[in-house]
Image (cartoon, helix red, strand yellow):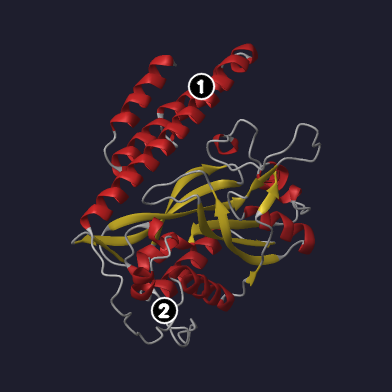
Amino acid sequence: MDDLRQKFIDLIAGATDEATLEQVRLSAIGKKGEVALKMRELGRMTPEERQTVGPALNALKDEIASAIAARKAGLEDAALDARLKGEWLDVTLPGRRRGALPGTIHPISQVWEEVTAIFADMGFAVAEGPQIETDWYNFDALNIPDHHPARGEMDTFYMHRTEDDDRPPHVLRTHTSPVQIRSMQQQGAPIRIICPGRVYRADYDQTHTPMFHQVEGLVLDKGTSMANLKWVLEEFFSAYFGTTVKTRFRASHFPFTEPSAEVDIQCSWEGGTVKVGEGDGWLEVLGSGMVHPHVLRAGGVNPDDWQGFAFGMGIDRIAMLKYGIPDLRAFFESDLRWLRHYGFSPLAVPTLHGGV
């Protein structure tokens, strides 16, 4: 562990720009970094070994994170000094008068409304829930076992508690699936809902951010099947992208569904851009499956009488696909130029008859 520490401390000290520093961060404490891989080995250790190795790994992670933050601050200060030396401004010049610029609707807000309009036309109601959830709603009720990687602090934001706090642990929800449990408890079955909302995971790169947006769907009835699921998804994608879109289901595994399937949509790759609904390529967009009996019981629904399907997709991801936005991080940087370019008119309310 000392060698690992020295390796990354040297790499951090040698980073000359923020891009290099970010690569060092990902390779050290990112989701697939070396420290994260060491964390995953804790499950194969004895309790005595975990008591020693676990705190050491957490200390190493904190030390690397602190060193990265310090180096980043140093690089920013150096860049600012260079900019101040190279730029010159006459502060005595009069200001330029500009007319008020109209505001625009953020792409995420626009796509959120588009998704809601399409599913509302298919009879789905919108359900909402708290963004701070108990460990039970976020994991246990969804059949996610204690040893699942998603429950680790490397992937989930846990709320800080004092030693004498005996309340159940709370997390920033990692998906909107807890809303499904709460809706089943409140409404029972049959049910047909979508659950759009903000979710949080400890990850950050071109296609991942610590906070992003999801929409999940849940349908419970007497004879609901995977065929119904496929129809719903193909109808949604065809309406959303404005062209007939075929889907492909691939067998997968999720704790909360059985059977489970990853869903791909038909697309082509031309000139570095993705065109949905044509060609012979496929792009993975969501996970889905038939709701697991354990999840139905957690929601107070008898699996002997009811069955149904669930699915979930990223609102930000499908916004990037439809409107050609290359970097997920730009959604949250509050760049006015970006917002004016990708934003929508406040009068362009998404409807099926008016266009989405």
Which type of secondary structure does the marked residue at label 2 adopt? loop
Which type of secondary structure does the marked residue at label 1 adopt? helix
Q: Is residue 171 left or right of residue 184?
A: left
Point 72% across, 43% down: residue: 136
Q: Quadrant of residue 245?
A: bottom left
Height in image: 138 above or below 23? below
Q: Quadrant of residue 272?
A: bottom left
Q: Is residue 115 left or right of residue 295?
A: left
User: Foreground residue, 17 or 343?
Assistant: 17
Q: Do residues under tags 1 and 2 come within 8 Å of each other at their CB atoms?
A: no
Q: Quadrant of residue 124?
A: bottom right
| Residue 244 appears anywhere in the view | no
Point 64% across, 12% down: residue: 48
Mark 1 vs mark 2: which is more N-terminal?
1
User: Foreground residue, 117 or 25?
Assistant: 25
Q: Position of residue 299 (x, y in %)?
A: 75, 52
Cα separation, mark 1 vs mark 2, equals: 48 Å
* Label at residue 344: 2
Q: Is residue 150 left or right of residue 278?
A: right
- In this rendering, the label closer to the viewer, 1 or 2: 2
Which amino acid type corresponds to the residue marked 2 in the rendered image?
Phe
User: Foreground residue, 152 or 62?
Assistant: 62
Q: Residue furthest front?
A: 92
Point 77% across, 64% down: residue: 187
Image quarter (top left, top right, bottom left or bottom right) of the C terminus: bottom left
Q: Is residue 278 left or right of residue 310?
A: left
Height in image: 231 above or below 35? below
- Label 1 sits on residue: 41
Q: Position of residue 194 (x, y in %)?
A: 60, 65
| Residue 183 appears anywhere in the view | yes
